[in-house]
Amino acid sequence: MKRITILSGKGGTGKTTLSSNLAVLLSKKNKIVTADCDADAPNLALALGLLEKDFSLWEKVQTNERAVLDEKRCNGCKKCLDVCNFGAIKWDDKKNKPIFNSFLCEGCGSCMLVCPNKAIKLIRISNGKIGIAKTKYDFSIVSGQLKVGTTGSGKIVSLIKEKAELLGKKEKAEIILIDSAAGIGCPVIASIQGSDFIIAITEPTPSGLNDLKRALRTVEHFRIPYGIVINKFDLNKNFSRKIESFTKKYKIPLLGKIPYNKKFVEALVNLKPIVTESEKYKGLFEKIIKRIEISGFT
Ligand code: SF4
Ligand code: SF4
């Protein structure tokens, strides 16, 4: 099984559009499974025409812990107050005891370690859910959602990938296509780990190129081969040329350039990947797949 991950240095660059269209085309020749690892804003299922109710099973996940106080054991020594780096502990003057803010607590356990009276313990909390569904294009998707106001998307991403791997083995998939979280943080690192090829999508703006370079530094750390796609390249042709020069200078495969067209918006609104509606765009995304193959991904 090979793993292709699609990432972008920042949100809103067309990562999910690229993922959904490549998934539909790849599934015509290969058995594939897709994984939406953008647990903060999962949209891949939607782009493939699936609604929440279409998922056969949503499983709650508990990847986070929170500190809770056993008031009877606490003697008000305040030792816990000094060790929290997340500002999650406040002091209740009336009770002379700490108050733990569950939204800010990262479950690091420092307060528990310094408490001389074993008055603090960590409890597991539900911080998201993972579901599996079958698309009408005859491949499965594993998708995760982080609960609003909770953290731990990196751990959820690892769980989504584990489920996709298991499903891939069960369905004898040849390719797992991963729609990564945006940015360069922990969920992105969890998304790209173990990948065989990365497609980095960017847009022709200074921030697009800057964020792309930051994301690529992370990819290079893992020594994973990669290529670049420029989205909406015709909105700023001068800047697109700059990105092309960047790819030439560093010998990075330029996998494709996608133009801006309102048909992409219409496809998203209709919950249909554009390759299912337009031969012209089908050809464009097929070329991207060919270049991925030429770039060493087999
Ligand atoms: S577990 Fe860590 S983050 Fe949570 S309150 Fe204790 S020290 Fe702060
Ligand atoms: S360290 Fe323990 S005993 Fe001291 S204030 Fe905090 S919870 Fe209470």
Image: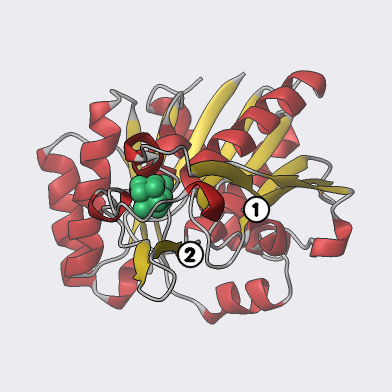
Give the residue type that dot 1 points to: Gly
Q: Position of residue 183 (x, y in %)?
A: 34, 55
Q: Earlier in the sequence, mark 2 or mark 1?
A: 2
**Left or right placement of residue 146 versus residue 193 in this view:** right
Q: Where is mark 2, residue-wise?
A: 103
Find residue 187 and report its image quarter.
top left
Residue at x 32% of width, y 66% of height:
233
Q: Residues within 10 Å of mark 2 (few under 14, many from 20)?
A: few
Q: Nearer the viewer, mark 2 or mark 1?
A: 2
Q: Position of residue 21 (x, y in %)?
A: 61, 53
Say what secondary structure mark 1 lies in. strand
Q: Quadrant of the N terminus?
A: top right
Judge whether residue 162 can be spotted in this image: yes
Residue at x 14% of width, y 59% of height:
242
Residue at x 36% of width, y 44% of height:
111
Residue at x 46% of width, y 51% of height:
181
Front-lying residue, 219 or 146 = 146
Above or below 204: residue 18: above
Front-lying residue, 277 or 185 = 185
- Is mark 2 in CB contact (under 8 Å) with mark 1? no
Q: Where is mark 1, residue-wise?
A: 128
